[in-house]
Amino acid sequence: MFTRRNFIKTGALAIAASAVTNPPKLFSQIRKSPAASKKMELTFWPYDAQLRHVFTIANFSRSTTPLVLTQITYDGYTGYGEAAMPPYLGENQDSVIAFLKRVDLSRFSSPFEIEDIMTYLEGLSTNNTAAKCAVDIALHDLMGKIMGQPWWKIWGFNPNTTPNTSFTIGLDTEEVVREKTKEASPFKVIKVKLGIDEATDKMMINTIRSVTDTVIAVDANQGWHDKHYALDMIYWLKERGVNMIEQPMPKLWLDESAWVTERSPLPVVADESCQRLTDVPKLKGAFTGINIKLMKCTGLREAREMVSLANALRMKLMIGCMTETSCAISAAAQLAPKMDWADLDGNLLIGNDCYSGMKIVDGKITLDDKPGIGIIKL
Ligand code: MG
């Protein structure tokens, strides 16, 4: 159980750690410290991301997102990680912290034993994907810093092939939607959350179209409950400059989804239907592609495997996110060169980002040579 006393203890460690690295200079964050310990130390603390706008999707609204931030130190280097817990994934700050307290990295001799470490985490619990991700991201940041290279380069990806990222506009009144659409003008793709009812869905699209011709990507978040209606909506959306549809129907409706995908004039991408690597094979035929999110699939190690599997199955790829700081967003961005679509705007939706990382330049995800996941702690 996560108690106030433990919070104070963990928080004090976090403050002590940030005092050591303050002011935040990139060099001081990747340089090997002289008092290096060849023992991995995992630290974690809760962090509430404050949203710039109240965020609404088909089933609920919210104004904050609970996060847990992590760091792992080893041999004078520090790797950063993050767990983001939107309510529908069933994790919260208490459950993530309870999980992380059970993690004993002293069983392993270095972060390069990540295969064994992730297998060990899997053995601690069948769920807790965001908590596992918080360890996975920190390990990748640590390994990349020790090797002195960013992950896109270690994997051999071409940084010039990153897609544009979309910028999400939630369900709202016409006036607010017009305002948010104007705010989204630097982006080449606007993502719209639909799936309430026909009048509201069409109002959203028509309102955006009254302001801009920018390409729209639609996420129905399982909100359409009839395959004929879903197909009719997809045709209506195609005529209005929509380029893809994410999760039109409930996640378990794979036969209905296959019926829609076969007839759809637009690519249909699985989000809620696709959580882990083991979900991917059964989605072939039911969807055109999959939306990979680090918080669903336990992090970069499994996400990289999902990329290879989807490539082998000739399925398209999208990288998505929760509301996350630049830590998890920059980690996900390392995979962007392999993606057909990207929705990595989670850090832009929050007002208290505590990291600086991947930048969006002219709407496009832009990778640089900062090692690991490419972030600086602010
Ligand atoms: Mg989605």
Image (tube, helix red, strand yellow):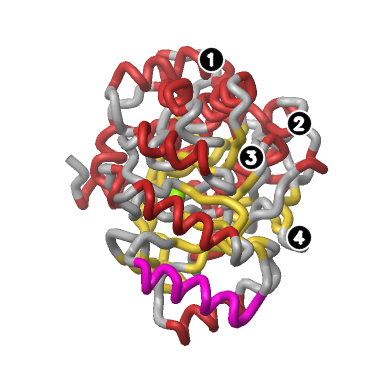
Asked if residue 209 lies in the magenta stretch, the reply is yes
Q: Is residue 11 visible?
A: no
Point out which mark residue 141 bears: none
From the image, state whether disc 3 or disc 2 is nearer to you: 2
Q: Inspect the image, locate mark 2, and give the three-letter code of the amino acid beneath it.
A: Phe
**Structural distance between the alpha carbons of marks 3 and 2:** 14 Å
Q: Residue 55: x, y in percent?
A: 39, 67
Do residues under tags 3 and 1 come within 8 Å of each other at their CB atoms?
A: no
Q: Which residues are magenta?
A: 198-212
Asked if residue 314 lies in the magenta stretch, the reply is no
* Circle 1 SS class: helix
Q: Identify which residue, 251 or 297, lies in the foreground.
A: 251
Q: Say whether disc 4 or disc 1 marks the residue closer to the N-terminus.
A: 1
The structure residue drawn at horizontal position 41% and vertical position 52%, both measured from the top left corner, is 230
* Circle 4 SS class: strand
From the image, state whether disc 4 or disc 1 is nearer to you: 4
Density class for disc 4 (Cα within 10 Å; few <14, some 14-19, many ≥20) is few
Do residues under tags 4 and 1 come within 8 Å of each other at their CB atoms?
A: no
Point out which mark residue 373 bears: 3
Disc 4 target residue: 361
From the image, state whether disc 3 or disc 4 is nearer to you: 4
Q: Inspect the image, locate mark 1, and give the three-letter code of the amino acid beneath it.
A: Glu
